[in-house]
Image: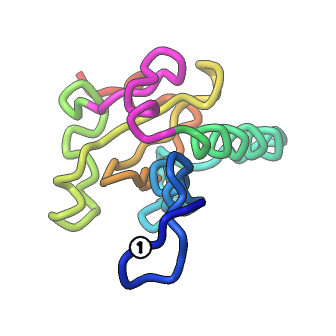
């Protein structure tokens, strides 16, 4: 029989996480800072846009089932890693964001294949804030010299 919490009428289950505990440990996405109109980092404007969006949402769905530490350590499996602005075409990083958000860790992950590019954003707690969709992989391939 389950024990009762002192002062609480609900039983405490040992060993089983609650649905809330399960979801709090998973990667969540926010689109609060998404820049769809960015000149360089935007959705493809081609006939393949529908297929691209399906791939994008499939990857977001896949990652949203991962625990946050597993996502951070996925490395080669997702081609995910922190962004080193000094090695990119955008040395000022997310300059359009407020100072507090610029202090968050910039991160990226791959959609599937090299030709589908990357999704760039910020990591804060267990939330990935999507900022740019880089379907042509211009952040690194188009870097300034």
Q: Position of residue 83 (x, y in %)?
A: 29, 32
Residue 37 seen anywhere in this rendered image of the structure? no
Give the quadrant of the N terminus.
bottom right
Crowd class of label 1 (few under 14; some 14 to 19; many from 20; radius 10 Å): few
User: How many labels sit on residues?
Assistant: 1
Q: Residue furthest front?
A: 1
Please provide the residue range marked out in magenta.
Answer: 67-83
Q: Is residue 24 left or right of residue 106?
A: right
Query: Residue at image x 58%, y 36%?
Result: 135
Report the residue marked by disc 1: 5
Is residue 100 positioned above or below 16 on the image? below
Is residue 77 found inside the magenta-colored segment of the image? yes
Q: Is residue 8 a member of the stretch shown in magenta? A: no
* Relative depth, front residue between 119 and 13: 13
Asked whether the viewer can see residue 127, the reply is yes
| Residue 144 at x, y percent in the picture | 27, 27
Q: Position of residue 20 (x, y in %)?
A: 53, 63
Which one is in front, 3 or 100?
Answer: 3
Numbered disc 1: secondary structure: loop
Residue lying at the far top in this picture: please name it: 76
User: In this view of the protein, which residue sits in the foreground, 123 or 97?
Assistant: 123
Residue found at x 33% / y 48%: 123
Which residue is painted at 38% across and 35% down in the image? 69
Q: Nearer the viewer, residue 70 or 121?
A: 70
At horizontal 53% and vertical 52% (from top left) the residue drawn is 17
Q: Is residue 70 left or right of residue 102?
A: right
Residue 49 sits above or below residue 143 on the image: below
Q: Give percent across and percent down for residue 68.
A: 43, 41
């Amino acid at each position: 029989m389950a024990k009762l919490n002192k002062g609480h009428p609900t039983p405490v289950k040992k060993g089983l996480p609650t649905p809330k505990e399960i979801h709090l440990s998973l990667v969540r996405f926010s689109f609060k800072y998404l820049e769809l109109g960015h000149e360089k980092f935007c959705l493809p404007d081609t006939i393949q846009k529908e297929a691209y969006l399906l791939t994008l949402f499939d990857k977001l769905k896949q990652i949203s089932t991962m625990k946050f530490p597993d996502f951070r350590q996925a490395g080669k499996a997702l081609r995910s890693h922190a962004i080193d602005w000094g090695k990119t075409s955008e040395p000022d990083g997310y300059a359009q964001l407020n100072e507090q958000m610029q202090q968050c860790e910039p991160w990226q992950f791959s959609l599937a294949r090299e030709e589908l590019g990357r999704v760039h954003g910020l990591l804060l707690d267990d939330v990935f804030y999507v900022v740019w969709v880089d379907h042509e992989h211009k952040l690194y391939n188009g870097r300034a010299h």
